Structures are given as C-alpha cells and as structure tokens.
Amino acid sequence: MKLKLANLPSRIEKLKLLSEELGVNLYVKRDDMTGLELSGNKIRKLEYSLSEAKKLGADVIVTFGAIQSNHCRATAAACAKLGLECHLVLSADKPESYEGNLFLNALLGGHIHFIGDSDMKAYGDELGEKFKSEGRTPYFIPIGASNATGSLGYVEEAGEIIQWEEENVTFDLICLAVGSGGTYAGLFYGMAEAKRDVDICGFSVSSESEVFVGKIGKILGDMGMERLDRSKIWIDDEYVGLGYGKTTSGELELIGDVARKEGIILDPCYTGKAFIGMVDRIERGDFSKYKNILYIHTGGAFGWTKEHRDMFMDL
C-alpha cells in the first residue's frame, strides 16, 4: 500500500534533435514532472515510506541528506501536505545564504539541522530519543529514501516502462543518476522480476562504483532478491567530476545545450552529470551496441544555486 502524492505515470518522450545528432534513439522518462514541490524521483519512494510512517502512527519524520538534497526538499513538501512535522539532518555547515533546495526546505516548514562533519547516525539517534522522551513517535527515512521500502517506488516505475514498451519501442539500455542507490535498486529489481533483459547504467554523482554496488546489493537483499549477481549492477563513476554538487563550465555548457535543443532542464548536481556521462559514452562508441536508450530524468531543477547560475551566465 502507498500514498498517492505524485502525478504518475510520468511520460516518456523521444529527444528528437539529440537522437539525430548522436545517431541513436534516445528517450527520456520525465520523472522531473511528477509534481512541482514534489517533483523528481524521490516522491515515488516517499509514497511508500510515508505510507508506512502513517501506519506506524508517526507524528514526526526525520530524514537525512546533503545540503542540496532533492530528497529532503521532497520530504519537507510531502510532510507539509500530510500534516507531519519534518526534521532534515544535513551534512553541512550553516551557509551564509539559503539557495535552491535548501531555501525550499525552509519555505515548506522543514526543521533544518546543520551538523557539519558530525556523525549523522549518532545525531539522528539522539534526535529520536529526544522525541520519544516527549511522548512522540518518530519515523526515520534514510538518505534518498534508499531502502527496501522506498525502492518499491521504482519497482513500480519499471512496470510503467514495460507497459509503455508494449505500445512503442523496447529499450535495451536505461541510464540514470545514482546518489544513494535506491532508484537503481528498484529499477533493477522490477526489471529482474519481470524477466526483462535490459542493461541499467547508473552514473555516480559522488562515490566510487564499489560503494554503490555495495549499497544497491544490500537494498536488493533486503527486498528479498535471491541469487543476486552483483556483477550485473553497473555503476559508472567516471563523471563525478569535481565532486558532489560541484560543476565545471564545460558541464554547464552541455546542460545549456540540452535545454536549448530539447526544452529539458537538467541540474549540475545530479541529472546533469549523468546525462553528460551518457552522451560522452555514446559519442565514444561505448554504447554502440544499444539501439534504444532511455534516460530517467530524476528531477533536480531546484538544485541550481547562485554559484551555478552565475557560472552559467558567464559562459
């Protein structure tokens, strides 16, 4: 059982100009259009996570993330809709100004805890004990809602893709950004359960591939997947660039090119890095065996900070 918070199913559309330029049939699944405040991939996971929270009688939600976390923004918005108090534990120092998702977190009524380099789990445990001592019932959602419960949202998306394929083309490669692993795990599980032979390439936005293979493998195990062949979990870590939330003028140029040609807005933190990686792999011939490629647009337009905007305007 889940809540109904997102506009689903999200549509799939062909990127005609880029397909012609790159010599491949390139499609995009518009999970950036699952809503406004709730837009992006995280709301799919929250439909399941927050449903479980309500069943357990929770009255306060605690979740975790980086300073520009799309998940934290979506959680704050969903909690506002559901009348739940929301606490966001961010692995960052308090900034001089609130930009992008961080501003929306505050606007939506999220209680923001800046913990710098402190231990996130320890801080969350202390916060939970505090709420319990006050007679409250906290519910904890991990980074990106990336656990067995949250990943059910992308098992559902796998079904949407398969249903669309029955009326249109069949994809032989799916590409997406990987920031915590839950989206990838859900897609992988859903396609495996449907016995769909499709490669899934996840582009890391932060860590080395081995880190995400481990995280995704654990989620899949928690979901009950038996006989998991971890060698089939494909994480490309060559496009992390300067690091999480950081970008270069070259990356911004390609993001701008996609916006002008296809009217699609990527962000410098997540979707931009993955799209850049996918295009580069296509141009280098690394994806030459694939005919129909689907890119999962996981959202993130709110992640454009003033620094990113200023860099783009200086191009």
Image (tube, helix red, strand yellow):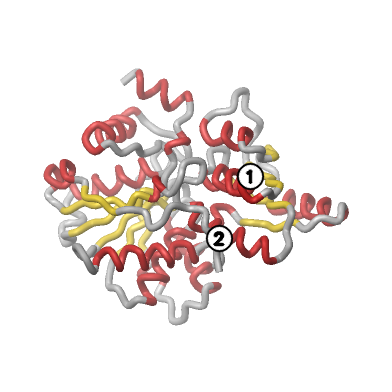
Work out which quarter of the rendered image holds the N terminus and state it: bottom right
Instruction: Measure the alpha-carbon separation of dots 2 and 1.
Output: 14 Å
Is 53 situated above or below 279?
A: below
| Amino acid marked by disc 1 | Ala
Q: Quadrant of residue 54?
A: bottom right
Is 113 situated left or right of 308 in this image? right
Work out which quarter of the rendered image holds the C terminus and state it: top left
At x 24%, y 46%, the residue is 279
Is residue 115 visible in the rendered image? The answer is no
Q: Secondary structure at mark 2?
A: loop
Q: In the rendered image, which residue does mark 2 sit on?
A: 3
User: Looking at the picture, how far across and down is residue 123, in whole percent?
Assistant: 74, 49
Is 294 situated above or below 276?
A: below
| Amino acid marked by disc 2 | Leu
Q: Residues within 10 Å of mark 1 (few under 14, many from 20)?
A: some
User: Looking at the picture, how far across and down is residue 269, in whole percent?
Assistant: 44, 39
Q: Quadrant of residue 160?
A: bottom left
Is 183 situated left or right of 171 in this image? right
At x 40%, y 64%, the residue is 187
At x 39%, y 40%, the residue is 241
Q: In the rendered image, which residue does mark 1 sit on?
A: 80
Is 234 situated above or below 30?
A: below
Q: Residues within 10 Å of mark 2 (few under 14, many from 20)?
A: some
218 and 36: which is toward the camera: 36
Is 240 situated left or right of 64 in this image? left
Q: Secondary structure at mark 1?
A: helix
Q: Residue furthest top?
A: 314
At x 73%, y 59%, the residue is 58
- Which of the two labelled residues, at mark 2 and mark 1, occupies the earlier sequence position? 2
Is 284 situated left or right of 81 in this image? left
What's the mark number on residue 277?
none
